[in-house]
Amino acid sequence: MTSFLHSSNFTSVLEAEKSTLGKFIEILKEEEDALVQGKIEEIDYLSSNKSRLIEKLIQIDGHRNEYLKNQGLALEKSSISNWLEKQLLNQPGIQTLWNELLALAQIAQKINHSNGLIISTHLQNNQRAFAALHCAAGNVSLYGSKGQTYI
């Protein structure tokens, strides 16, 4: 992994991370729309794009973390924010960029959680429909001996 020793390179890493995270959020929004509208065929396409962006984010995260470790920092949000405030006073743009990155990460987390809930709801509906069909086919036992759903 390449070492980033200058704050200008650190800024470039944060900008790349922000840009990639923005693209990731757009994919999450498209995924949400596809899930809500039942366009399941789009999910595979979006999943491959999402995976590609996750790999890129992991790589960028590694570069950022290497720089921060080289500065002697613990990789915690509060530690990084404090360091940015103290060390980079002459470069307020980096602090702003860091705050924007944290805000984008929160947005991505919320949308991803929402998408997970939508997927869970679809799964529950499919399980109920399957159980109803299974019952209609003559197998009326919907629960196993330990109370678990039996299909």
Image: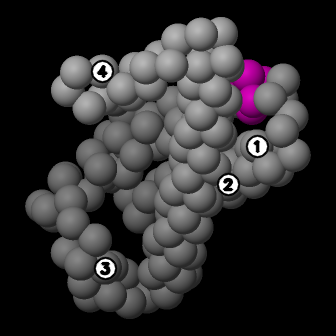
Judge depth for marks 2 and 4 and give the one in front. Answer: 4
Span shown in magenta? 43-48
Residue occupying image coordinates x 59% and y 19%? 135
Nearer mark to the viewer, of 3 and 4: 4
Q: Position of residue 20 (x, y in %)?
A: 64, 48
Where does label 1 land, which residue?
A: 35
User: What's the CA distance linking mark 2 and mark 4?
Assistant: 41 Å
Evaluate whether residue 30 shows in this view: no
Q: Position of residue 104 (x, y in %)?
A: 57, 67
Q: Is residue 150 in view? A: yes
Q: Label 4, on which residue? A: 144
Indicate the secondary structure of the residue bearing disc 2.
helix
Quadrant of the rendering where the N terminus is positioned? top left
Of the two numbered discs 1 and 3 in the rendering, the one whose residue sits closer to the viewer: 1
Residue 88, by quadrant, is: bottom left
Separation of residues labelled 2 and 3 (CA atoms): 23 Å
Q: Is residue 39 left or right of residue 129?
A: right
Q: Judge the density around disc 1: few (<14), some (14-19), many (≥20) Cα neighbours within 10 Å.
A: some
At x 41%, y 64%, the residue is: 7
Q: Secondary structure at mark 4?
A: loop
Residue 66's label in the rendered image is: none
SS of the residue under disc 3? helix
Instruction: Name the residue beneath numbered marker 2.
Output: 25
Q: Earlier in the sequence, mark 1 or mark 3?
A: 1
Disc 2 and disc 1: Cα gap in Å? 15 Å
Q: Of marks 1 and 4, which one's residue comes earlier in the chain?
A: 1
Amino acid on which the number 1 mark rests in the picture: Leu
In the image, what residue type sits under mark 2?
Ile
Dot placed on the residue nearer the N-terminal end, 3 or 4: 3
> Could you say where residue 46 lies in the image, as x and y percent from the top left?
74, 32
